[in-house]
Image (tube, rainbow, N blue to C red):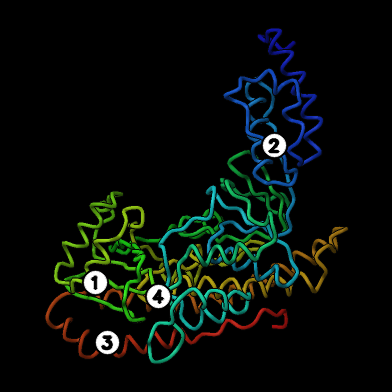
């Protein structure tokens, strides 16, 4: 008996150590309810255990339960350790596209997502021609085209795609168990030169050969590479979407309204759904997480809109409105920063957070996923994914991975700088006030900006092939 331990605690500790002998060498979430320790635990503290032995959420429940038990009896915290060749942090557009790209090339990956389900922020995104090339590369372009209207633009392919639909299409094409939800990364450390240890909030540690950060503007992985948090632009955005059960009746055209330091736009997604946004100069303190006040704020700033357009905002449900400060990474930080370092890299908003004025944030994330999957696959296939039986093999594998990630960084650095810079410039021009600026914007710069939009959307990320 440990010092200060009573008989009941002693019995619990012995039973727990017996249970650990069963669970330590198995990831199966079975027989826990059969253990004597489980029966001694208060019902309210017992985890809900599922029957599926390969269910990742069950593994998490077991880990949390065992951690609680060990803390209660004063034993050392039990840590579940796992191994995955490729770990992707974040189940957003960049993360899922990268994972699906690797899957199409015959390579498995594990995607860690901190939330309990797919996170749907922003509601929709503009997908230009460059995005559709990426979507076609991973094989989901046709399905998404059937669900979204083609916007009349004169040239190129533009659609307003619902973010939820896009993420669900990506998830559907991935093997079961690829995405592990409720898996928040809290720290990253080196186990050796060749391996990274990814620590999760539930105590799990995952050992990996390749770590990819697609964890958004508040990226843990980008911090590991030395990037600073993205900077506030001095502007904020309110976004929403409205569903018209009987059809909205709008033509498939993009409608934009600019003036008095604000900018708003309206996109039909399909026959029933219209996506809208509103951006304005603000301080981050002005934002208030109150959808009703957000709606009234937008209507007060856009009281001169045509009635049909105003009705889109008025009919938006409160759970379909969100707001956020607009942040971006300074171009010089991308120029001088480490997009990759060893066997770690970043992509998507973790690499190039930008303002929405160019409509290329999500498109660039799709591009990233294709290029990154191609670079990683080329590195792994040159050595064989399992050729790490000795130190020499591990060194060769690491060097291949390192060069593959460097190649990705080289291909994406200037593209990212270009998009960040132009998006910021367009936003500055379109929200500037004054008679001179209004004249320049409306009479001279409008055609120039339109040309930039089309030019930047003509990018081709290439096919999913390891030949590069």
Q: How far apart are marks 1 and 2 (CA)?
A: 55 Å
Secondary structure beneath dot 3 equals helix
For residue 442, which quarter of the picture? bottom left
Q: Report the residue at 14% width, 83% height from top.
A: 436
Secondary structure beneath dot 4 equals loop
- Please provide percent x and percent y for residue 350: 50, 62
Q: Is residue 111 left or right of residue 282?
A: right
For residue 434, which quarter of the picture? bottom left
Near mark 2 (Cα within 10 A), the count class, few <14, some 14-19 or many ≥20, is some
Q: In this view, does 67 lie to the left or right of 362?
A: right
Q: Report the residue at 23% width, 64% height from top.
A: 281
Name the outermost residue toward the front: 246
The image's mark for residue 446 is 3
Q: Quadrant of the C terminus?
A: bottom right
Near mark 1 (Cα within 10 A), the count class, few <14, some 14-19 or many ≥20, is some
Residue that carries the numbered disc 4 in the rendered image = 359
Q: Is residue 312 left or right of residue 392?
A: left
Q: Distance between the residues labelled 4 and 2?
A: 43 Å
Sooner in the amino-acid sequence: mark 4 or mark 1: 1
Front residue of 318/460: it is 318
Q: In this view, does 434 lie to the left or right of 10?
A: left
The image's mark for residue 309 is 1
Secondary structure beneath dot 2 equals loop
Sooner in the amino-acid sequence: mark 3 or mark 1: 1
Sooner in the amino-acid sequence: mark 4 or mark 2: 2
Sooner in the amino-acid sequence: mark 3 or mark 4: 4
Residue that carries the numbered disc 2 in the rendered image = 79
């Amino acid at each position: 008996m440990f010092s200060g331990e009573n008989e009941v605690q002693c019995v619990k500790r012995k039973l727990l150590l017996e249970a650990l002998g069963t669970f330590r060498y198995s990831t199966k979430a079975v027989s826990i309810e059969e253990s004597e320790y489980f029966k001694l635990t208060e019902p309210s503290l017992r985890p809900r255990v599922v029957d599926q032995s390969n269910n990742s959420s069950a593994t998490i429940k077991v880990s949390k339960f065992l951690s609680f038990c060990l803390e209660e009896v004063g034993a050392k915290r039990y840590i579940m350790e796992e191994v995955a060749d490729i770990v992707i942090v974040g189940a957003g557009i960049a993360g899922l596209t990268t994972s699906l790209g690797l899957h199409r090339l015959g390579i498995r990956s594990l995607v860690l997502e901190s939330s309990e389900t797919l996170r749907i922020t922003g509601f929709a995104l503009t997908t230009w021609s460059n995005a559709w090339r990426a979507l076609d590369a991973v094989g989901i372009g046709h399905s998404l085209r059937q669900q979204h209207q083609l916007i009349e633009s004169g040239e190129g392919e533009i659609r307003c795609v619902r973010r939820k639909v896009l993420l669900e299409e990506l998830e559907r094409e991935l093997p079961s168990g690829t995405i592990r939800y409720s898996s928040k990364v809290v720290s990253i450390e080196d186990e050796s030169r060749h391996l990274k240890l990814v620590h999760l909030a539930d105590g799990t540690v995952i050992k990996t050969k390749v770590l990819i950060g697609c964890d958004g503007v508040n990226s843990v992985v980008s911090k590991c590479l030395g990037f600073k948090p993205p900077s506030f632009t001095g502007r904020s955005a309110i976004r929403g979407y409205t569903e018209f059960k009987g059809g909205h009746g709008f033509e498939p055209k993009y409608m934009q309204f600019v003036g008095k330091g604000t900018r708003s736009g309206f996109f039909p997604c399909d026959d029933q759904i219209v996506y809208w946004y509103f951006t304005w100069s603000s301080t981050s303190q002005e934002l208030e997480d109150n959808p009703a006040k957000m709606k009234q704020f937008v209507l007060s700033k856009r009281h001169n809109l045509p009635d049909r357009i105003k009705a889109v905002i008025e009919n938006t449900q409160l759970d379909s409105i969100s707001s956020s400060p607009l942040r971006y990474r300074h171009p010089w930080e991308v120029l001088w920063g480490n997009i990759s370092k060893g066997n770690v890299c970043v992509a998507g908003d973790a690499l190039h957070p930008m303002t929405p004025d160019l409509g290329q944030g999500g498109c660039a994330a799709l591009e990233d996923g294709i290029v990154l999957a191609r670079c990683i696959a080329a590195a792994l296939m040159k050595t064989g994914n399992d050729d790490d039986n000795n130190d020499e093999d591990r060194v060769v594998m690491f060097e291949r991975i390192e060069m593959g990630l460097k190649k990705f960084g080289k291909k994406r650095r200037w593209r990212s700088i270009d998009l960040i810079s132009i998006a910021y410039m367009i936003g500055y021009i379109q929200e500037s006030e004054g008679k001179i600026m209004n004249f320049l914007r409306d009479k001279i710069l409008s055609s120039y900006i339109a040309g930039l939009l089309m030019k930047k959307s003509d990018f081709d990320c290439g096919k999913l092939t390891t030949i590069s």
